[in-house]
Structures are given as C-alpha cells and as structure tokens.
Amino acid sequence: ERRAALAASTGPGATSDGHKVPLLANVGGPADVPAAVEAGAEGVGLFRTEFLFLDDSTKAPSEEKQVEAYRAVLEAFPEGRVVVRVLDAGADKPLDFLTPGDEPNPALGVRGLRSLLEHPDVLRTQLTALAKAAEGLPVYLEVMAPMVADRIDAKAFADACREAGLQAKFGAMVEIPSAALRARSILQEVEFLSLGTNDLAQYAFAADRQVGAVSRLQDPWQPALLDLVALSAEAASAEGKSCGVCGEAASDPLLACVLTGLGVTSLSMGAASIPYVRATLGKYTLAQCERAASAARAADSAEEARKAAQAVLSGE
Ligand code: PEP
Ligand code: MG
C-alpha cells in the first residue's frame, strides 16, 4: 500500500483540497541535483554552498569556480525556484580563514552571516558569482543569509545583495529565536523567511545539535519550537510574504502536515523524503492540518505533540 501511494505521488505538493505547498530539495551542490529532479522537487529550497569551500579551508574559492558550481544547480531547474544560502561557516562548519579559533562557545560566536559581515570581500565575491551564474537563465533566484538575529543583520545582508547588483529576492533564515520573535521587523528588510529548524531548536533549547546527550531537546516536535514556527509564519502572512521550512523538520511527513497547518508556505528537505511528504500531505485537507497543528501546540512534550497530531489526522 505504501509503495502504491508513493508511485501515485507525483506532481506539485498540495493538501487533498488543493492548498499548494511547494516541495523543494535541500542540496549541497551539483552532485545532489539528479536525485532532486528524480524525486520531482519543484526547485531547491536550500542550496548549502559550504561544499565549495571545503576543498581548501585556507581561502575562498575563486569567483569563476563559484560561478560554474552555482550555474550547474540553477540550470537544472528552469522556471523553478532555487534558494541559495550564502556561506554558513563557523560552529559545526568551521573554516580556517573565516572562523576565529579561540571562541569559548563557537555556536554563539562569529558564524553564519556574522562571519560574512566581518569578511565583506568573501560575501561580495559570492553574491557577484551568483549574479553572474543566474544571468540569462529563467530561474527564480532567491538568496538568503544564515543566522540572521535582527533587523540590522537583515538590512546589512540586503544592502550587500543590492550593492552586488543581484537580481533576486533576498531572504533571511530564522534560526535564532530573536528572529522568530521579531519576524515582522526583519521582513521590513527582506522578502521571505526560511526556518532552519535544526539551529532554531539548538538555540531555543540551549541544546548543542552535536551533543547526543541533549538530543531530546532537539526534537522538532517540541511545542516551543512549533510556537516559534507559528510566530514566523504568522508574521510573514501579515506582511504578504512567504515563510518556508528547510530544516530537518520538513522531512517528517506527519510534521510536514503540522507545519502546513501552522501556515508555512513551502517545505524543503533531502530529496529522498519528498515522495513520502507529498503522499502524506495529499491525504489531508488544510483544515485537518490546522487542527493537527493546534493539537500539537497544545501538548506539553514532543512525544505528546506527535501523538496528538497523529490522533487528529487519523480521525481518532
Ligand atoms: C538548519 O539549521 O535547520 C539549517 C537548515 O541549516 P544547517 O542545518 O545547514 O545549519
Ligand atoms: Mg542552520
């Protein structure tokens, strides 16, 4: 039955009553594109550009090398959306030439957008390479910054994009609770939000994502995390803008329904999860997803939230 459901699962992501939720792929570079296309991804919701920087941790790759890699991904989704995340270095992804080696708490230090603002040349080269890679292609390019904390960060990023002459939508990742709490203020500077639920959970629960002993707190079903998702999605809706999810949470089919019910407008995940999420989402109406979301938020633990959503969706 499962196999039949998956085989029947093609086309754009939508609830059973036709509420569209584009299903996008998380990719790390051109090598991940064939699987994304095969799974029927409607575009890329998170292009992690770190891979390009891993070969040589002492300096940034040349503009030419970057143009080539970005173009290979952009070309694969003609007419589709491709959301590129600028370099997210530091903490769990350190780079010698960017990451300070002497921080007592690297996850709370100079990482993500913070390191790019300290090295504007690296950001400028990346944005210029993206502008060149997108030239002449019909793709809808969106560029977002990791680890945006507030409106000042969002403005600094949008200014850098404009200065590089980038013809694209500029967005902010919501990975820090302050950004979820003040999402409307951030949306005065950027055109879309994308929730990085892995880091958002890490920072909301003060639970290092690399420490197995605190993994209970990293569970994306945590009602407090769902509250932060809801705040962000409501802010985006009030501003007439989009709010996707690109963290691991989007790849859990049941949770994908809950996120949809919370008002999230697109879901991005590893390609392998797309058919499962598409099949599950297609079984329920938007109203059912909304009821499952309310039930999950009313719970007091991740486990209860999961059970409550399951009960609503299975009609118990
Ligand atoms: C996240 O934090 O949820 C995210 C998508 O970014 P990364 O996992 O690359 O930090
Ligand atoms: Mg992150």
Image (spheres, rainbow, N blue to C red):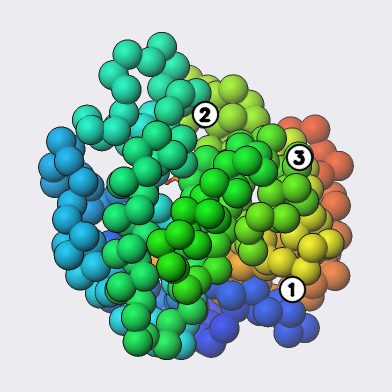
Mark 2, ligand 1, within 8 Å: the answer is: no
Q: Is residue 252 depicted above or below 219 in this figure?
A: below
Tell me which residue sits at (52%, 28%) in the image. 215
The residue that disc 2 covers is 215
**Left or right of 212: which side holds 178?**
right
The residue that disc 1 covers is 284
Q: Is label 3 in a helix, a strand or a loop?
A: helix
Q: Identify the mark nearer the N-term, 1 or 3.
A: 3
Q: Is residue 171 depicted above or below 10 in this figure?
A: above
> In this view of the protein, which residue sits in the foreground, 112 or 205?
112
Q: Label 2 amino acid?
A: Ser
Tell me which residue sits at (25%, 51%) in the image. 51
- Label 3: few (<14), some (14–19) or many (≥20) C-alpha neighbours in 10 Å: some
Q: Is residue 172 visible?
A: yes
**Which mark is nearer the camera, 3 or 2?**
3
Q: Residue 263: horizontal and vertical position, in percent?
A: 76, 62
